[in-house]
Image: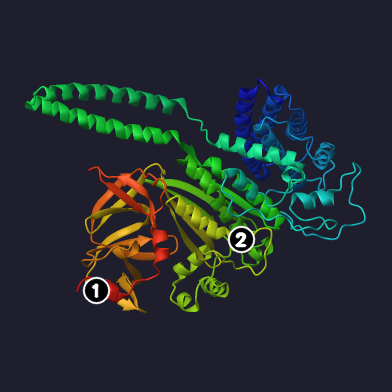
Amino acid sequence: MSHFQGMEELLKDFLTEAGELLSDVDSKLMELEQRPNDKELLNTIFRGFHTIKGGAGFLNVTDLVNLCHLTENLFDKLRNSELLLNAELMDVIMSATGCVSDMFGPLRSSQLPAPADPGLIAAMKAALEGKTAAPQPAPAAQPAPPVAAETPKASTQDAAGVDWQHWQNTILGQPSPATAPAAPIAPENAGAPAAAAEAAAPARSPGRRATDQPDRDGARTELRENDKVAVAAAESTIRVGTVRLDQVLNLSGEIGLAKNRLNCLRTDLLQGKRDPETLRELDLAVSRLDLLVSDLQNAVMKTRMQPIWRLFQKYPRMARDLSRQLGKNIEVALKGEETELDKTMIEDLGDPLIHLVRNAVDHGIESPADRVAQGKPEKSILRLKAQQIGDSIIIEISDDGRGMRPDIIRKKAVEKGCITADAAANLNDDESLKLILLPGFSTKDTVSDVSGRGVGMAVVKTKIQKLNGRIEIKSVIGQGSTFTIYLPLTLAILPVLVVRCGERPFAVPLALVREIIPIHSEEVQAISGKATMVIRDEILPVFSLASLIGWPRTQAPAYGVLMQSAVRSFILAVDSFVGRDDVVIKPLEDIKPRGVAGATQSGDGSVVLVLDMEELLREMASESRGDLLKAAA
């Protein structure tokens, strides 16, 4: 029998509110580390834990109450200046918040969580007595000390019996010399937000419970499976403001009135009433219905929109934990957190942004000593920015680190077997930077618990393409790198360019389209047996749509659609084009034709296939100039 029988709705409400409170606490902790004497921040964090403790107490979750009570006491002493905040105390606090978050897992399955790790409880009690490793707070601008897995001294325990050396090593992700197993590598292509959050942590903290370790019996397995089901159920819900729901309701009422008016006009027309006044009224009614449906579409889409801060807020802590593990000093600056994005897209963006942030911390940003030697500030700034421009969402992840060298990337790509030496020699610097998106590419010769397997950036590319987006990379040696992600505002409606192959229409995602150009046969040149065109000093391959979909060609293509995918630019040769449209993609039931992402319906009722350009290009590597020009003969 469930511990929460009869309290399921209360438990659900508690988890929703407590999850939001804990996310806000994590965000406030990052600010507190920069402003340790900010009383308002301390009060806000204190109130967050107090509220979570109150809800847990009402539900009789004793172990969660005890953990929140200890954390609440720590903040009570901090805000009363009885304790001073330093890096070691912050590590203890953050481990406590991680343990609170872990306790939510069993609760989602209506199970009581296990008690917090005794080592965490001992460390918190010792901290309440002022027995931390560093009695004075570290200045906010000073770098975090590098942590190395050194041989322990004979004894590092304090009077409370807490082994602070082992505790600090465990918090910062360094294996204890006595145990010395390699830290588990976070999954690099987990699909769910829960897995993404797991990947965000560089190592297990001592606050993690035994249920986080590999399963050792069937009961634990059952609990973890129940957790997955509960998490999936939670992710299928969304909180919508009443203002937006009222807007949908009002528009529904207006559409009902428009429908009634059209029914009356239909009756008049069937009775032979076709005078100019009736036709004018019909035209007005149809126009009004068209406007109302468009407004309703937008209103419904907005009910799925969520502010991107829900995604951004976890990265400051992740970067902080990882930078301390690597002995670096990094501050994360967020901008545009209020930008709204479709809920599904926010969930799917978790993994790509995790990889980009981890790579920036591990690869891109230098150690404090190296930065000082180059005349840079010890503290590096990692910036995450989001903004909406038109129908697109643009997300930037930029650092002020060492930058990337295109020549080194080309060399490594050849060494790893990602591309051939001949192909590498033909790439410019911008194209070379995109080689890091290829599967198997890595500039590291050894694998660490952070990176080196050559999987992460390939996951980034795959996830972004799945969202009908693209990624651009810019880098300046010694100044840093910027990754820019371009995404559609929503996946519910896809902007497309409708083109024709013969008389048949096809749609391609507008996000890939740069421009439309005419094709003249004399401008098509053969380079190494491949059809190419020179556009503003850029040599681009030409692929005919007919060849890509395997149709016979009866005429020379008249137009070229200049397209930009995640790793290449190319020209799609088509017979003609219809124009831009916003469509709703429907999957094809029981079949998956090669290179077809789905189907939509045009205004005249015909079915239009939406093409998956990346899949088509993978199937056809190149097309010779002779093949292209043969159609003109």
Residue 590 seen in the current view:
yes
Q: Which residue is mark 1?
A: 630
Q: Is residue 351 above or below residue 284?
A: below
Assign a secondary structure to mark 1. Answer: helix
Assign a secondary structure to mark 2. Answer: loop
The mark lying in front, picked from 2 and 1, is 1
Image position of 522 (left or right of 268):
right
- Name the one closer to the observer, 402 or 277: 277
Estimate the x, y position of residue 467 in percent, counting from the top left: 45, 50
Residue 98 seen in the current view:
no
Q: Which residue is mark 2?
A: 365
Estimate the x, y position of residue 285 in percent, counting from the top left: 20, 28
Image position of 337 (left or right of 391):
right
Estimate the x, y position of residue 98 in percent, counting from the top left: 70, 41
- Name the one closer to the observer, 494 or 97: 494
Could you tell me which quadrant the C terminus lies in?
bottom left
- Near mark 1 (Cα within 10 A), the count class, few <14, some 14-19 or many ≥20, is few
Q: Amino acid at mark 1?
A: Lys
Image position of 619 (left or right of 366):
left
Q: Amino acid at mark 2?
A: Ile
Could you tell me which quadrant the N terminus lies in?
top right
Image position of 536 (left or right of 319):
left
